[in-house]
Image: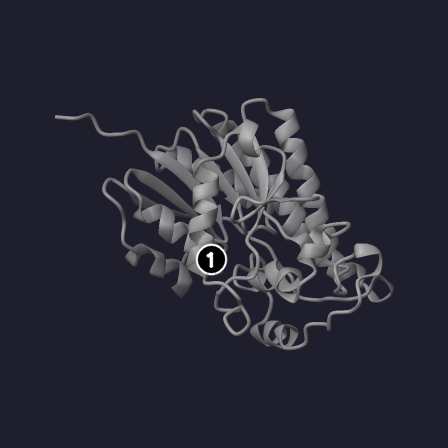
């Protein structure tokens, strides 16, 4: 009788909606995978529904509570994984949870809105990284993936100056909210996205002074993670604008096509091939 293959262990934040749920569904369908769904509200209908997803041979789902705005959730979740579920290592961590809900000019930016983006999008990623790094470093080929966006780029390449690129992760973010925002506020914001403008000095053609800086920061942090840990492949992936519950009406590409592309990229990633860089879902290198 052949020995049972070792488990590949994946942790995904914001895993009950949108992009996170799509990635979780694909990973869970693979054989001998333990997929950890980190969600803000484990008892919400969307979180409970994850238990009905099909699983590959020898695979299992674990759900833990991680609110990206709550510092203590991250360490407590890792301790639960160790003590309750017997998790002794992690192979992949995908930092997917985030928010985007206002699109002001810098001259109109409210500090509370900037803070509202920095806490989940930056502090939450740092807390997650610090909590999971010890388990990641016990993996044979550890990979850290930050879901990114060209909305966080200082400049953009001319070939990417398209509406779907600029709005890409902004709309995806709505489908994996990690902090409580009212449904009415969310709907109002979604229906009042700012118009595209002529991009000055190759800047993204969209007012975005709260979300953009938060993503620029987390891009920098991810590149630094890769530089600091010689055993780790840490990199950023931009999923573009794909079909989720918030992006269906205008998305150019099927969500599943992009989910598959991202899983293939992550599974084939090594430190030498992917580490410390910014990638599109098809494996195209994007300038910071």
Q: Residue at x 61, y 64 (%)?
A: 164
Q: Residue furthest left?
A: 1
* Image location of residue 92, percent across then percent down: 46, 37
Label 1: state its secondary structure.
Answer: loop
Residue 9 horizontal side relative to residue 210, left or right: left
Q: Which of 194 and 71 is in front in this view?
A: 194
Q: In which quarter of the image is the C terminus?
A: top right
Residue 47 horizontal side relative to residue 66, left or right: left
Colour basis: one colour
Q: Which residue is drawn at 78% across and 66% down?
A: 104
Q: Quadrant of residue 204?
A: bottom right
Residue 188 horizontal side relative to residue 260, left or right: right
Q: Which residue lies furthest to the front in this view?
A: 159
Q: Residues within 10 Å of mark 1 (few under 14, many from 20)?
A: some
Q: Mark 1 points at which residue?
A: 41
Q: Nearer the viewer, residue 144 or 52?
A: 144
Q: Which residue is drawn at 50% across and 70% down?
A: 248
Q: Which residue is drawn at 75% across and 63% down?
A: 205
* Image location of residue 61, percent across then percent down: 33, 47
């Amino acid at each position: 009788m052949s020995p049972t293959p070792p488990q590949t262990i994946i942790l995904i934040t914001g895993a009950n909606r949108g992009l996170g749920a799509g990635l979780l569904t694909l990973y869970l369908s693979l054989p001998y995978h333990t997929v950890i769904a980190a969600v803000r509200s484990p008892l919400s209908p969307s979180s409970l529904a994850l238990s009905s997803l099909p699983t590959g041979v020898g695979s299992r789902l674990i759900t833990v509570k991680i609110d990206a705005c709550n510092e203590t959730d991250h360490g407590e979740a890792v301790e639960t994984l160790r003590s309750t579920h017997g998790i002794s290592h992690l192979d992949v961590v995908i930092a997917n949870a985030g928010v985007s809900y206002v699109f002001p000019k810098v001259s109109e930016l409210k500090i509370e809105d900037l803070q509202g983006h920095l806490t989940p999008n930056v502090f939450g990623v740092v807390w997650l990284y610090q909590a999971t790094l010890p388990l990641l470093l016990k993996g044979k080929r550890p990979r850290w993936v930050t879901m990114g966006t060209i909305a966080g780029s200082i400049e953009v390449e001319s070939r990417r100056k398209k509406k779907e690129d600029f709005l890409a992760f902004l709309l995806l973010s709505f489908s994996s909210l990690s902090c409580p925002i009212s449904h009415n506020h969310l709907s109002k914001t979604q229906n009042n996205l700012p118009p595209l403008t002529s991009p000055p000095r190759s800047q993204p053609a969209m007012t975005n002074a709260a979300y953009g800086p938060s993503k620029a920061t987390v891009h920098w942090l991810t590149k630094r993670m890769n530089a600091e840990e010689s055993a780790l492949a840490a990199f950023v992936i931009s999923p573009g604008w794909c079909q989720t519950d918030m992006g269906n009406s205008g998305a150019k590409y099927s969500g599943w096509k992009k989910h598959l592309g991202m899983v293939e990229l992550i599974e084939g990633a090594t430190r030498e091939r992917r580490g410390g860089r910014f990638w599109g879902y098809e494996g195209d290198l994007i300038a910071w």
